[in-house]
Amino acid sequence: MNCEACQLKELEVEHFEISEVLRCILHTIVFLRALGLVQPKDVDLELFEITYVQCGVVEVEKKIDEKIEHFISWVEKHPNKKSQICLSFYEVKSKQPSWFTNKTERLYWEQWYVNLNVTQRPKPYSGKSHHTKMVVDPGESASEERSSRRAMLEASLGEVLSQIIKFVNEKKDHVPPISEGVIYFPYEITIPSSPDSAFGMDMIKRMLQTGHPTMLS
C-alpha cells in the first residue's frame, strides 16, 4: 500500500502554547479526513486570531487531549528539545495467523509529522555591582518582543494549516475505499518517549511497512 507522508513546518513554541497549537493542528487533520456525518464545531484559539474546526466527536476530542497531555509531560522531562508527533491513518487487514503475529495488521496509508521546538524564555537578569544591586526589568522592549514573537508564531501556524489543506486537496489517490457507516478513518497518535519504550519499536515497524523515514531529533 502506498503511504503518503507530510512533514509539517517546524513551529517554535513556548510551554504554555503547546496545547492550543497541537489541538488546532491535530483536529484540523482529523476533520479533513472525516468521512461520515459529523457535527463540525468551530473553535476559536485563545492565544491567536485563528479558528479551526473539530469533528464534534467526543472520542476524538478525548483521544487528542490525552495524547497532548502525555506529550506535555514528556516535554517537561526534556526541556529545550526539538520533538515530533506523528499522526498516522491506517487500515486494519486480516492476515494469515502464525505463532508470532496477530490475526490482523495495521496498514498505514498516511502519516503527518508535527514538528515542534519547545523553548523556554530566559528570566530577567539580576546581578550585583560593587555599589548597588542591578535588576534588569524586561519592561516595554520585552513586551514588544513577546508580541512580535506571538505574531510570527500565529503566521507560521496559519502556514501549517494551509500546508495541511493543500496536502489533503492534492493527495487523494492513496486514500482507501470508504466503508459504510464509518465516520472517520482509524488513526493513532505517536509521541516521543524514552529510547527503550515501545515508541521506538513502533517507529521502526512503521519505517519497515511504509518505507518513509522519521525525523525525530
Image (spheres, grey):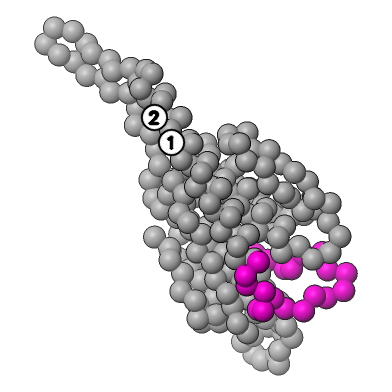
Q: Position of residue 117 (x, y in %)?
A: 42, 49
Amino acid type for the residue under numbered disc 2: Glu
Please tell me how crowded label 2 is: few (under 14), some (14-19), or many (20+) other residues with Cα within 10 Å. Answer: few
**Quick check: marks 1 and 2 in contact, CB under 8 Å?**
yes
Whether residue 158 is visible, yes or no, is: yes
Residue marked by disc 1: 149
Q: Is residue 213 magenta?
A: no
Magenta residues? Answer: 169-193
Q: What secondary structure is the stretch in magenta mostly built from? A: loop
Residue marked by disc 2: 145
Whether residue 87 is visible, yes or no, is: no
Give above or below for 2 relative to 38. below
* In-front residue for pair 196/134: 134
Quadrant location of the N terminus in the rendered image: bottom right
Give above or below for 153 relative to 85. above
Which residue shows up at 53% across the image and 62% down it? 113
Which residue shows up at 13% across the image and 7% down it? 131
Which residue shows up at 56% across the image and 59% down it? 163
